[in-house]
Amino acid sequence: MERKFAIAIHGGAGSILKETLGPTLEGEYKNSLENSLVAASNILNKGGKAIDAVELAVEIMENDPLFNAGKGSVMTHDGEFELDASIMDGRNRMAGAVCGIRNIPNPIKVARMVMTHSEHVLLSGKGARRFAEKMGFERVEPDYFFTLERAKQLKAARKRDKILLDHSHDEKHGTVGAVALDMNGDLAAATSTGGLTNKKFGRVGDSPLLGAGTWAENKVCAVSCTGQGEAFIRSATAYELAARIKFAGLNLENAAYLAIHETINSLGLSGGLIAVDGFGNIAMPFNTIGMYRASLKQGEKPFIGMFKN
Ligand code: ASP
């Protein structure tokens, strides 16, 4: 049976306020989200695969310095760029991920290669880079990732000796992710990030961890999370959401709501997620002030949002 496709993307959750963002940046974020959504939807519209759509949506946002992924990634305490990404195919729960990878512009594409061209699921640091090079990925110098905004954020974070993902302050985040249902009824999810500003000691967040930041399982749901990674790891958020649907019979909206507003809230931490189920329902809850997000259901008007409501 052919289904209607559905897709959702996010560009991170945080203290995103209309007043502080300003009209120019608001317009830029809107365009960027739209570009990613449209390109990925075109794949689905032609009958293409969910896994290809989520990879492309994330790749486009990785190439955009506005987001904390790929090109616009935040800096570690030592002023380096160490990127995390994962991708999961709901058809067979095949998955690939990289963490702490340096010098590679599009970690999501490497994650896809880990899924398709290795016998492993998660590769880290130097090994992940060696694998990427072996697969023919171009290596770039660290200044490729450099943006003035991220350098300023690091300086401020170092001064406060703080790992930045305090959503009560004015830091901008921008981890990116995508979830999709294709016309075949297959689900997929992808997430990519630079992590947290001022992260130390090889810290790895939830984004490359299946079950924490990313999950996709046909007939259940596809999920991509953003926020304080430690909270999402401690809650196995993406899988918790899926389990509430699978074992407790909740619908997507309720399961997604509880994952954020009950579980993440109960840890006193913050973030958001996007999720789609096998019927094409979409949920995008967050307990931060805002979340960059966009979605499209086949035959309906696209939605682009940043603030509450
Ligand atoms: N979840 C990401 C991490 O903890 C950061 C983010 O979503 O902004 O690495």
Image: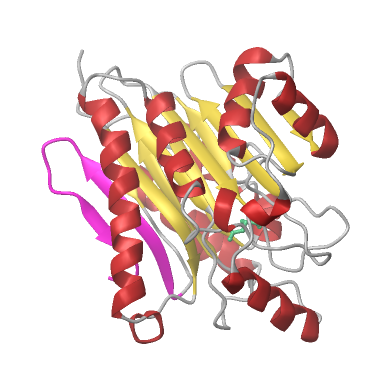
Drawn side of residue 127 relative to residue 122, left or right: right
- In the rendered image, the quadrant that contains the N terminus is top left
Residue under the point 30% across and 37% down: 39
Relative height, residue 70 to residue 248 (above, below):
below
| Magenta segment includes 76 | no
Where residue 77 sits: x, y (%)?
Answer: 81, 67
Relative height, residue 51 to residue 189 (above, below):
above
Where residue 279 sits: x, y (%)?
Answer: 27, 31
Drawn side of residue 222 relative to residue 141, left or right: left
Drawn side of residue 298 relative to residue 57, left or right: left
- In the rendered image, the quadrant that contains the C terminus is bottom left
Where residue 251 sits: x, y (%)?
Answer: 35, 43
Residue 179 seen from this side: yes
Residue under the point 73% across and 19% down: 134
The answer to which image quadrant residue 104 occupies is top right
Residue under the point 79% across and 27% down: 130
Where residue 110 sits: x, y (%)?
Answer: 63, 29
How many badges with numbers are in the image?
A: 0
Relative height, residue 146 to residue 213 (above, below):
below
> Foreground residue, 19 or 272?
19
Query: Magenta region: which residues?
Result: 289-309
In the displayed orientation, state which residue is furthest to the right.
201
Ligand 1 resides in the quarter of the picture at bottom right
The answer to which image quadrant residue 215 occupies is top right
Drawn side of residue 164 relative to residue 290, left or right: right
Residue under the point 74% across and 50% down: 82
- Color encoding of the figure: secondary structure
> Foreground residue, 78 or 187?
78
Residue 280 seen from this side: no
